[in-house]
């Protein structure tokens, strides 16, 4: 297994937004794909895990952006396994431009799951060798999002029914699709007049095809929060997006 996995990344038209920027969901998808290829390089492809009834399930993602990459920009993505603590594994990422300046850094917390029993497993249950990188973690496992109870005016709930296009081979809504869900709730002023500088998403409960999620969003200072919950009031995910006013507005 390579100590640090490196691969090129160039966003396509289908991964861009109206302003020619890479969508946050495309960044998350590139991160997930790089992690899968890193494991495949170690002889543990996704299909082999599924044969064993195992899956990696993302618990929390933390992304910090120096700037939002652009459509067609040649980028280099690095990722490495930072090891486990308790039931959580940490995987880190860095994204660079052609000038070798860092564009993004991210940390993710994963857990190993028995997909038949839907039960979290300890690291010792992983049946294949999985060396920890010699490169240290950027800042350890990302902290979970906790949406505020006070000081924020939440929107009225909006029902979202999980569609076919968001569900992956594990039978639940893919982690990257939650970024689309969140940005789709932003208003045009937010999308045009603010830059995204960081975001975190915590995945509390998986959502399957046809599930209904009640969505709420609200802003507190420079932070914009989104959460979803089941019809019984159980949180499915929580997200926070850090925004700053643009120095130049789109025409």
Image: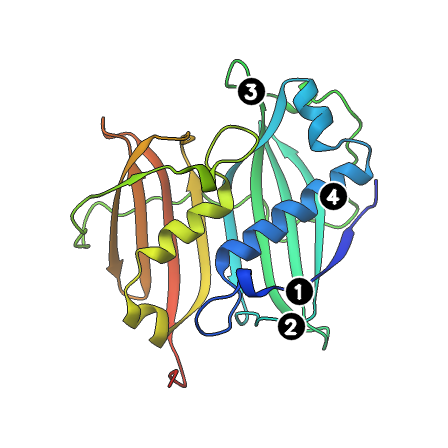
* Mark positioned earlier in the residue sequence (2 or 1): 1
* Mark positioned earlier in the residue sequence (1 or 3): 1
Mark 2 and mark 1 residues within 8 Å of each other at the beta carbon: yes
On screen, residue 193 versus residue 14, left or right, reads left
* Residue under pointer 4: 37
How far across and how far down the image is residue 22, in percent? Answer: 53, 65
On screen, residue 61 versus residue 73, left or right, reads left
* Residue under pointer 2: 73
Characterize the local packing of mark 1: few (<14), some (14-19) or many (20 or more) Cα atoms within 10 angstroms: some
Q: Secondary structure at mark 3?
A: loop
* Mark positioned earlier in the residue sequence (2 or 3): 2
Mark 3 and mark 4 residues within 8 Å of each other at the beta carbon: no
Name the front one of labels 1 and 4: 1
Q: Quadrant of the N terminus?
A: top right
* Residue under pointer 1: 10
Q: Secondary structure at mark 2?
A: loop
Q: Residue at x 69, y 17 (%)?
A: 52
Q: Residue at x 56, y 20 (%)?
A: 115
Q: Secondary structure at mark 1?
A: loop
On screen, residue 86 versus residue 156, left or right, reads right
On screen, residue 81 versus residue 179, left or right, reads right
Looking at the rendered structure, which numbered label has been put on residue 115?
Answer: 3
């Amino acid at each position: 297994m390579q100590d640090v996995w490196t691969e090129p990344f160039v966003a396509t038209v289908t991964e861009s937004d109206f302003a020619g920027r890479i969508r946050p969901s495309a960044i998350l998808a590139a991160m997930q794909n790089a992690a899968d290829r890193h494991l495949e390089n170690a002889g543990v492809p996704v299909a082999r895990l599924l044969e064993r009834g195992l899956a990696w399930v993302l618990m929390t993602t933390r992304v910090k952006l120096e700037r939002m990459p652009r459509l067609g920009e040649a980028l280099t993505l690095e990722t490495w396994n930072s090891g486990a603590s308790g039931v959580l594994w940490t995987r880190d990422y860095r994204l660079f431009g052609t000038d070798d300046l860092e564009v993004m850094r991210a940390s993710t917390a994963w857990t190993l799951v028995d997909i038949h029993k839907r039960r979290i497993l300890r690291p010792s249950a992983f049946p294949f060798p999985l060396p920890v990188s010699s490169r240290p973690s950027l800042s350890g496992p990302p902290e979970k999002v906790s949406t505020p109870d006070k000081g924020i005016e939440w929107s009225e709930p909006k029902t979202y029914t999980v569609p076919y296009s968001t569900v992956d081979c594990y039978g639940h809504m893919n982690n990257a699709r939650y970024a689309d869900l969140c940005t789709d709730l932003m208003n045009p002023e937010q999308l045009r007049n603010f830059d995204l500088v960081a975001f975190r998403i915590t995945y509390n409960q998986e959502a399957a095809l046809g599930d209904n999620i009640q969505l709420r969003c609200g802003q507190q200072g420079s932070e914009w929060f989104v959460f979803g919950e089941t019809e019984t009031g159980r949180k499915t995910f929580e997200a926070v997006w850090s925004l700053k006013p643009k120095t130049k507005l789109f025409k």
